[in-house]
Amino acid sequence: MRTIALFLFALLFTMCSTSNVQYRDDFRSVSESQKKQFLSDMNANGENFSVLILTKGFKGELVTISNEKKTLYKGTTITNLGNGIAHSLRIDNTLPTTITDKISNKEVIIEPKKAQQYKFIYVMKDNAETKNPYKITYSNTLRPM
């Protein structure tokens, strides 16, 4: 009986796991000096800031990025096919940050607990995925842009 209960408990957590979230630092990165320059340009050197980078899959929809204090970005967002970047901005990683778009009417929340551990948060959108179109990658590695 105890084994069955343990199995069902493990199965429940396996089914609830989010496959749309990754934690990676194992990809090609820019040099340390380029990373420092990028963070300086974004004014994101402090520990309470992370950089949110919208990547592939944005096709001209109205995207809104906000936290509980204010709207950080609202605009039509298109992924640049040359570098794979749609938009990047600095966020306060001590507050929940919400990303929504008008096409899918879905939202994703960047939780402070996770954001504070990583300097770069990459958000990709898969328009074919109807349940959750967003794929988030938390990283301390800045990819070449």
Image (cartoon, rainbow, N blue to C red):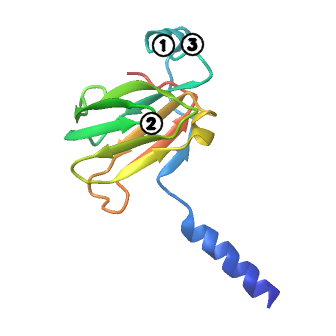
Pointer 1 residue: 43
Above or below: residue 21 compared with residue 50: below
Say if residue 123 shows up in the picture: yes
Residue, x 59% and y 17% (percent of image)?
46
Which quarter of the image is occupied by the N terminus? Answer: bottom right
Q: Quadrant of residue 32?
A: top right
Mark closer to the observer (3, 1): 1
Residue nearer the viewer, 40 or 19: 40
Which quarter of the image is occupied by the C terminus? Answer: top left
Question: Which amino acid type corresponds to the residue marked 3 in the rendered image?
Answer: Glu
Check disc 1: other Cα within 10 Å, few if <14, some if 14-19, many if 20+: some
Pointer 2 residue: 67
In the displayed structure image, the side of residue 57 where residue 66 appears, left or right: right
Residue, x 74% and y 84% (percent of image)?
5
Return the x and y of residue 8 as percentages of the image width and height.
67, 81
Question: Which amino acid type corresponds to the residue marked 2 in the rendered image?
Answer: Asn
Q: Quadrant of residue 62?
A: top left
Mark closer to the observer (3, 2): 2
Pointer 3 residue: 32
